[in-house]
Image (cartoon, rainbow, N blue to C red):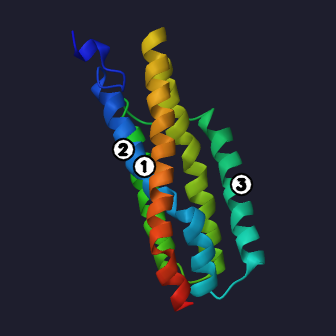
Amino acid sequence: STMHNCPHGLTHPRIGCALALSCIGEFFSTVLTIGIPIWLTVQLHAGAGAYAVVLSAMGIGAVVGNLLTGNVALPGRFPGGYCLVWTARGLLLAAFALSDSLMEVVAIAATASALVPLTSISLNAEIGGLPGPERLRVFTADSVKLHVASMSSMLLLLSDLPYHLRTL
């Protein structure tokens, strides 16, 4: 059948929906790459040292998240818990815009980074359960999705960068 040969996880609607959700989530999460240094500089009047602290907090959060992910299962049947974690990641992303101190940015960054392994590892585990050739196609689609979402987000930010540089 045509659906059986679909290379992007659509033969498994739950995985296809998870891929779409993570594509949207990664698009908005990439904003942090450029957004945090701008936010620290423009809104909090902080410098490179503050950015180093935030990056360290993100690293610590990611390590903690990886350690926890090996011992914690997402609640419910996939993709229910997966969607719940992405919702939390989205709320934390919005919380950056409301932060007004370096400590708030650090706490949000560490928490958001701790959730990343929960989403990536749970999706990879679900994809890993697919039969060989299909697993390879869906892992490829997941990888392409990540790069396209990140690249698109960066290009959107870069298109608006001249405006922000003029306002500094």
In this rendered view, identify the residue nearer to me: 164 or 57: 164
Proximity of marks 3 and 1: CB atoms separated by less than 8 Å? no
CA separation, marks 3 and 1? Answer: 19 Å
Amino acid type, callout 1: Trp
| Disc number placed over residue 12 in the picture, else none | none
Q: Which residue was labeled with disc 3? A: 59
In terms of secondary structure, where does tag 2 sit? helix
Which percent across, then down, holds residue 157? 48, 67
Residue 130 visible in the picture: no
Proximity of marks 1 and 2: CB atoms separated by less than 8 Å? yes
Quarter the N terminus occupies = top left
Badge 2 density bin: few <14, some 14–19, many ≥20, Cα 10 Å: some
Which percent across, then down, holds residue 158? 50, 68
Amino acid type, callout 2: Leu
Q: Which residue was labeled with disc 2? A: 21
The quarter of the picture where residue 60 lies is: bottom right
In this rendered view, identify the residue nearer to me: 133 or 162: 162
CA separation, marks 1 and 2? Answer: 8 Å
In terms of secondary structure, where does tag 1 sit? helix
Amino acid type, callout 3: Gly
| Disc number placed over residue 86 in the picture, else none | 1
Q: Nearer the viewer, mark 3 or mark 2?
A: 2
Image: 148 above or below 39: above
Which percent across, then down, holds residue 53? 74, 69
